[in-house]
Amino acid sequence: AISDSGGASHYFSHDDYYHKGDQQIQGQWHGLGAVRLGLSHMPVELETFKSMLEGKLPNGTELSKSDGTHKPGWDVTLSAPKSVSIMALAANDERLTKAHDRAVQTAMQFVERHASITRIKEDGITRHVHSGNLIWGTFRHESNRESEPQLHSHSVVINATFCEGKWRSLESRELYKIQKIAGEVYRSELAKEVQNLGYEVRRTHPDGRFEIANVPEELIAKFSERTRQIEEYLREHGLEDNAKNREIAALHTRQKKQDIPREELRQKWQQEVQGYDLKNLVDQSQAQGADHRRCCRLGRHRQVRRDTGHQS
């Protein structure tokens, strides 16, 4: 949960709001609620973002409880496996960054379908109603608090949904119930995307965690200081290794984030992976991915010919 709208500027920090050539990369609005407000796929502007966290929508609607309070929203964070981050950010395979973005959107659409619940009270009776729409702004980050490559996205769900003719606040219990499944949806979709790009994957945990098969474990360990901190915390406190406890451990071990320019970080990572021949791994995946796409096109072509009565 986001405690107050004042922290909104966190999502516009150096990592998240930068320039790439002439193209400005920043947060973007998504969700069927954003469509209704005319915001879908529009860039997230700071003042609009803060206002929406305060319950003030662009159409003039203001949301608050009877006591005048309003919960701002919830941060759904989805993080790529370390090997994916290395190949995307240190080996410069931008296909993986796009794959991550697509997997995040698939997971968030799952959240929208299953967690868009609001409470409507009429004549002393409270109903829990499924609205089917949410608003969220997604911000992609590239590093963790140890300045290691860590591709991840914060999707900030605004506490508002349109239901039965008006904008209402969300009932958040369902959001918490499905958070584990949403993570599994993300990892499943990302694994499929990564394989379609021509990489092989190896499963590392029953919950769907995986790594790219041919990225050296030594290199993954080299860039995994945050993982070591979290796992050490779990061991010291006798906690089971699951998503909830890892979140607790992450909060208790987090350091102040260093303000290092993005390009400087990229250059540092590229120097640290020299000698691992990651370019060859990218080239191999591109060739295998091209073969995979040709097979898929051929399969579709044969299916069309069968459907139209022609022999293939």
Image: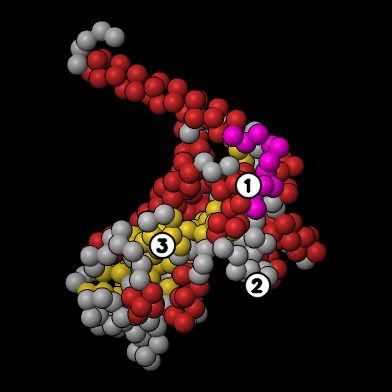
The one of 158 and 307 positioned closer to us in this rendering:
158
**Side of 240 where 53 appears, left or right:** left
In the image, residue 285 above or below residue 211: above
Q: What element carries label 3?
A: loop
Q: What residue type is labelled 1?
A: Gln
Type of amino acid under label 3: Gln
Can you say which quadrant of the picture contains the C terminus?
Answer: top left
Find disc 2 in the rendering and name its residue: 256
Residue toward you, 12 or 187: 12
Q: Which residue is drawn at the image coordinates 38% and 60% (left, top)?
A: 24
The crowd level at tag 1 (other Cα within 10 Å; few <14, some 14-19, many 20+) is some
Q: Which of marks 1 and 3 is nearer the N terminus?
A: 3
Pointer 3 residue: 26
Tell me the amino acid under the disc marked 2.
Lys
Q: Position of residue 165 (x, y in %)?
A: 19, 72
> Which residue is painted at 40% across and 26% down in the image?
293
Q: Is residue 242 visible?
A: no
Tag 3 and tag 2, C-beta contact below 8 Å? no
Q: Which segment is the magenta one?
A: 268-279
Disc 1/disc 3 C-alpha distance (Å): 24 Å
Give the residue displayed 34% in from the left and 84% down from the top: 64
Q: Is residue 239 magenta?
A: no
- What is the spatial separation of the Cα atoms under label 1 and label 2, in whole angstroms? 24 Å
* Residue at the extreme front: 21
The quadrant where residue 230 appears: bottom right
